[in-house]
């Protein structure tokens, strides 16, 4: 019986040796992130927060809207009421880069969509009554700069 076990034991020893030889080495520790990239990531996060505040302020100060829109008369004699509106439900796109001209300074841009809404009617009042439909969209790009990584993003003065 011992003779029958000997080939099995040899096979198991060989199998054990082969699997230990194939053992996977531990993955190298992740390389430390580039310090400049960490700064850019932080500035991007701060710019995204500032962008939300900036767009909220722009929405509050918008002078045009359904009650205060431009009315023109078309060639067909109908009136068209139109106004611009910052598109809701679409997050602004924020980009940050280091300034090429001023070491230590950074440039940020905020891109957002503005819709042109229109309504036609037989009278100016009917045109202003709505419902308004988006007839075009354009991308606005606002550029901001800060003098150092510790400065807050703010509107130009």
Image (spheres, helix red, strand yellow):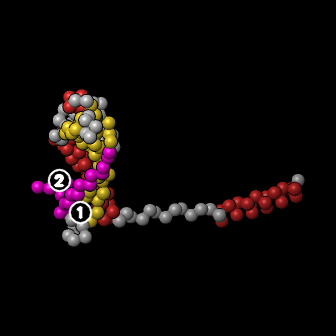
Which residue is at the front of the view, 90 or 33? 90
Give the residue at mark 1.
Answer: 106
53 to 108, vertically: above or below: above
Q: Quadrant of residue 83?
A: top left
Which residue is at the front of the view, 49 or 77? 77
Q: Return the residue found at the far front.
A: 76
Mark number, residue 14:
none
Percent position of residue 74, x then y:
25, 39
Indicate the secondary structure of the residue bearing disc 2: loop
The part of the chain drawn in magenta is 136-157
Residue lying at 32% horizontally and 46% vertically, measured from the top left: 137
Residue 141 within the segment the image draws in magenta: yes
Residue lying at 20% horizontally and 60% vertically, measured from the top left: 145
**Does residue 80 appear in this view?**
no
Residue 43 within the segment the image draws in magenta: no
Quadrant housing the C terminus: bottom left
């Amino acid at each position: 019986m011992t003779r029958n076990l000997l080939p099995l034991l040899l096979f198991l020893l060989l199998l054990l040796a082969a699997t230990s030889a194939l053992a996977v080495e531990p993955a190298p520790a992740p390389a430390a992130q580039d310090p400049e990239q960490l700064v850019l990531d932080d500035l991007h996060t701060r710019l995204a927060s500032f962008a939300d505040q900036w767009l909220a302020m722009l929405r509050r100060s918008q002078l045009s809207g359904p009650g205060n829109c431009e009315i023109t008369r078309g060639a067909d004699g109908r009136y068209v009421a139109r106004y611009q509106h910052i598109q809701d439900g679409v997050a602004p796109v924020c980009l940050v880069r280091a300034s090429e001209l001023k070491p230590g300074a950074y440039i940020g841009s905020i891109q957002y969509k503005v819709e042109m809404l229109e309504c036609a009617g037989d009278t100016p009042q009917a045109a202003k009554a709505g419902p308004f439909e988006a007839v075009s969209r354009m991308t606005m790009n606002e550029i901001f700069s800060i003098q150092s990584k510790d400065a807050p993003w703010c509107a130009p003065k």
